[in-house]
Image (tube, helix red, strand yellow):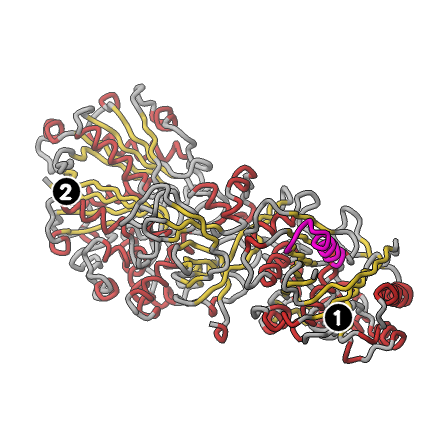
Amino acid sequence: MSEGIRDKVVILGMGCTRFGERWDDSPEDLAVEAFIECLEDAKIEKKELQASWLGSHIDEINIGKGGNFLGTTLKLPLIPVTRVENFCASGTEAFRGACYGVASGAYDIALAFGIEKLKDTGYGGLPDSPAFGQMQAAIGPNATAPGMFAQLATGYSARYDIPMDRVKEAMAHVSWKSHQNGVKNPRAHLRKPIPIEQIMGAPMIAYPLGLFDCCGVSDGAACAIVTTPEIAKKIKPNEDLVKVKALQISVSSGEEALYTDWDGAGMLTTRKASSMAYEEAGIKNPRKEISMMEVHDCFSITELATMEDLHISEPGKGPDDVLDGFFDLDGQIPCQPDGGLKCFGHPIAASGLRMIYEMYSQLLGRWPEDRAVKDPKFGLTHNLGGVPNQNVCSIAILGRD
Amino acid sequence: MVGIRSYGGYVPRYRLNKMIVFGGMGWINPANIMNAQGEKAVANFDEDSVTMATTAAIDCVTGFGREEIGGVYFASTTSSYKERLCANLVAGALAADESIRTADFAGGLKAGTTALIAALDAVGAGSANNIVVSAADCRLGKMGSVQELMFGDGAGSMMVGDKDVIAEFKGSFSTGHDFVDHFRGSEAKYDRQWEERWIRDIGFGQFVPEAINGLCEKCGVAPTDFAKIIYPCYYGGARKKINKTLGFEPDKVQDNMQAIIGDCGTAQPLMMLAKALDEAKPGDKLLVVSYGSGCDALYFEVTDNITKLAPRRSITGSLAKRADLDNYIKYLVWRRMVPADTGLRGEEQKWTRWTLQWRTRKVILGMEASRCTKCGTQQFPPQRICVNPECGAIDEMERVIVSDKGGKVFSFTSDMLAASANPPAMYGAVDINGGGRYVFDFTDCAIDDLAVGKSVDFSFRIKYYDAMRDITNYFWKAVPVAEEAE
């Protein structure tokens, strides 16, 4: 059995832009904004970067293909830039590339970057694109993300025989809680508390998902500089360090989409990736040991099902935990302490690194008391790219040294 | 013995009360109140002549193996293509063999019966057998026109063979007249017509009796020998006159369904024949006459085999499966008669890759799946590596057609964000009976008709229309089965 990369990589610095409708800012502006913060935090000079990985998802209205955007925008010193694309896991995938580069010994210091400029489409929601190839474009429905994730809710309700009203109530609490957290975050896109009644009564986007069950779409960028523990200690001799405990990816095998055994009430990939991540991190009981999470709440139902897929809530018991406040900021495992995708919006490839940024900042105790998680040990991030029946899941677990 | 082996029919689910049309456009021609009685059948937003002809043809081959089909003739004046043989689309959706005779019949409204005669002749000559003839029309009249109230949408289908026929073909008589009562030029979207009195008196009044008399003389029968006389004519006065002139008892004249469907052009005589066959008894002599640019008259005698024919939906069943379309503007948008905003998302490019369409035609048109010969798992679309995680056999697949298998709803949604000509877009995962799961569009239903576990049938529909390139593409959608039918 491979040993993984636990404790072999340290996050030296991070940067994250304000997410939102950055009408007047170009992708270059966003990239520079995140990079300046990251470089200052890392306490190194640009010339010390030896390699970089760049995540971006939608070429057409974003930064185009390849890695040239990053090299040119940041004026990187002719180092490798590898563009990675893996749906909503693209940011974490870039982080994984940089961490593996360091863990393998190929590089001492590497940069992971995630960026997405989405608000040049002219309409709400993600841009239409044949994400699953031409055959699916020819015969599949003209589906949207809310429409595909909505089916997780109808599937979940049927699988556990929980009335849709109860599922909707739990979904509403998921969104309510994230808005409560997002209010306090100056980098969030949506910073308004939303009453439960407003969430429950919102117009329907895709049955049974209403407006507040869906995250927004925004522009943003986030990045990380990673290195070995030895180098980190030299650069930051008297500071707490955040180490990478686990990084796992799982991709659908086709059985969810085409075979008839999948229950449609959760993601097989998340179940698999989280189990592998706990093993890599040495976590035996995630419900007890995980201190906080940033999960992929593209839709409230995704977060709800994910609580079970991460083996934190028992199957069918997610709504109970959610409604008990287990995942609220003052609950046992605060989930989305920064406001989540719900309040940040979802510039696809930036989201994974934005989540890592929140866990990193919490672990270093950088946030004011009103949004700080108390004495965190392990922080988990989770991305779910694609749709429930065809997706990629990425999990990162970070811990204080 | 050559004749009709089987038959089918299709009337789309939506019915538009003609008073709703008149309510919208009566102001421009108040006399149109005379034509505003009853309702007309209208194709759903994702239906056209090709899909309706396909649905009728599938109904027609109920109880027969698709490999028996020896030809497909499609008749319509409203094909989605000027160049592209639509009979091949119908044949593809029937999953018929590709080494068969296929042809489109068009031009005059008698093209439906002309296709039928061509099939009867081909089978009689021994050069083909079991030819499925399917006619459909979806003609448009301008807003406020008489034609808008007169025309309906629908399809009729007959399979012609030389064995076990349910109606023996006894003879035919045809005329061809360049009588331009209705016409559409090569670029026209809407029907134009000349004065109705002329159409009534010369068109129906002379040509129909001419064809019937011609047939009777040729076959040595009298008009009164027939148990059912089937001919289209939407003018009540002209029908009465023809019946009187030829001595037809009113109860022997097949209803033209003008008040419940409307005139379906090339499909009209075939739909009326299908309706007559729904009720026919062995020994009945049937006279079928078409009208439009001349007439075809055909003489059939029903045999004992009709009692053995597998049950089918046909016209009678289709008429029972109905829903009101209570919005005239919606009808106009569906037929692309008025522009509607589908948002910027609706303006995104839809590319049709003809190479892909060709190499996957059996999947797209025929809904061909694969079944693993190692573990028996059926899967759609066809896979090379078995999707059963316990199996994973490579290239051990056999072909299986699943378009007629139906399925059960596994998950569903109703999506207001997705671009659609008929929002909300309803779609969801369907477990295909016999195995396999795929996400399909739902159609002919409302959100309340959907539930996890609900039975669905598959229906051949327009998948999308590319307005920039005038490309209509087709695939299968799932239609919830009505409660009583489950």
- Image-based side of B355 in relation to A11, left or right: right
Q: In front here: B29 or B315?
A: B315
Q: CA distance from mark 1 to mark 2?
A: 80 Å
Q: Residue furthest top?
A: A78
Figure quadrant of the C terminus of chain A: top left
**Mark 2 burial class by Cα count in 10 Å: few <14, some 14-19, many 20+:** some
- Would you say the magenta stretch is mainly helix, strand or loop? helix
- Residue B120 among those drawn in magenta: yes
Q: Nearer the viewer, residue A315 or A183?
A: A315
Q: Which structural element holds mark 2? A: helix
The answer to which of B385 and B60 lies nearer the viewer is B60
Q: Is residue A181 left or right of residue B93?
A: left
Is disc 1 placed on a helix, strand or loop?
strand
Q: Which numbered marker is on residue B286?
A: 1
Q: Residue at x 21, y 48 (%)?
A: A274
Q: Looking at the image, how many numbered discs can be counted on the residues?
A: 2
Over which residues does the magenta segment extend?
Answer: B113-130
Answer whether residue B145 is visible to the viewer in this image. no
- The subunit letter for the residue under badge 2 reads A
What residue is shown at x 79% (from left), y 55% (from top)?
B108
Crowding near pointer 1: few (<14 within 10 Å), some, many (20+)? many
Query: Residue flagged by tag 2: what amino acid is it?
Result: Glu
Q: Place residue A48 in its image quadrant.
A: top left
Please determine whether, in this image, residue A135 is positioned above or below residue A230. Answer: below
Q: Please tell me whether residue B436 belongs to the stretch shown in magenta.
A: no
Q: Is residue B251 above or below residue B478?
A: below
Q: Position of residue B464 (x, y in %)?
A: 56, 50
Tell me the amino acid under the disc marked 1.
Leu
**Closest to the observer, B355 or A33:** B355
Q: Which residue has dot 2 on it?
A: A280
Report the side of A14 relative to B325 (left or right).
left
